[in-house]
Image: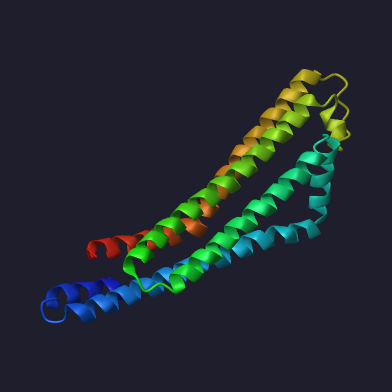
Amino acid sequence: MDELELLKRDWKKKEHQMPKLGYDEIYKMIWKKSSSIVKWIFLISIIEFLLPHLLYLLPAMSKTIAIWKGLGLGNFLLVSNIVQYSVVLFFIFQFYKRYKEISSLDNARQLLSNILKTRRTVKYYVIFCLSLIFISYIVMAAGIYLSDNPLDAMGYNYNLDNADPTKVKTTMIATVLLLGTIVTAVMGCIYFLLYGILLKKLNKNYKELKSMEF
């Protein structure tokens, strides 16, 4: 049992003696915890934004970009990067805004409202990121389907003279879609670990505030 729960129980036992003091202490503790949680959400979103850029230093990333261009998807890659940067930076700004708002709050009802806004913002952020990942694989599958020789376009020089081109395409498309599903699922688990635990704590704070019946 954490310190907040002990303090709340003590406040309920002694509320007829000193309700004002107990209320103020519990509110300040919930406020500080909520502010800290939103701060971590903000910091994690920044790290998550910056970390993938280190991958561009790896040789494998150059090959991945070449594959996209070979499939005629260079423009999509450019547009998707612009959209991704714009939307992610917008969400990071929203997380920062929520943190600053919560850090300066002195009203319980406003804190409740801000907690709800933060939870909603994180939810939309995760949905956007996972959707963009899966859509990217769908587009790659479409590029393979529209390509006359997807293996050559992707830079793979395999001798498949006796192979049925249709079956090769079908196998490649199925592989890309399966990989996209797996990657999206794995990223969903990572997002759950990164943000789900913090949102669970934030939701607990919300319930604590509601139970105090402001």
Between 196 and 30, the one nearer to me in the picture: 30
Residue at 84 percent of width and 44 percent of height: 66
Q: Residue at x 77, y 29 (%)?
A: 144
Q: How is the image coloured?
A: rainbow
Would residue 72 be found to the left or right of residue 189 on screen?
right
Q: Is residue 169 above or below residue 74?
A: above
Left or right of 55 on screen, residue 12: left
The N terminus: image quadrant = bottom left
Residue 99 appears in the picture as rendered = yes
Residue 24 image offset from top left, x and y in percent: 27, 78
Residue 28 sits in which quadrant?
bottom left
Q: Measured from the top left, where is residue 20 in percent x and y?
A: 21, 79
Q: Quadrant of residue 7?
A: bottom left
Q: Is residue 205 left or right of residue 52?
A: left
Q: Residue at x 34, y 75 (%)?
A: 29
> Who is closer to the viewer here, 95 or 205?
95
Residue drawn at (61%, 56%), measured in percent from left and top?
Answer: 90
- Between 35 and 187, the one nearer to me in the picture: 35
Is residue 142 left or right of 9 when viewed as pictured?
right
Where residue 14 appears, x then y in whole percent? 13, 78
Location of the C terminus by quadrant is bottom left
Q: For the image shown, how many numbered marks are present on the structure?
A: 0
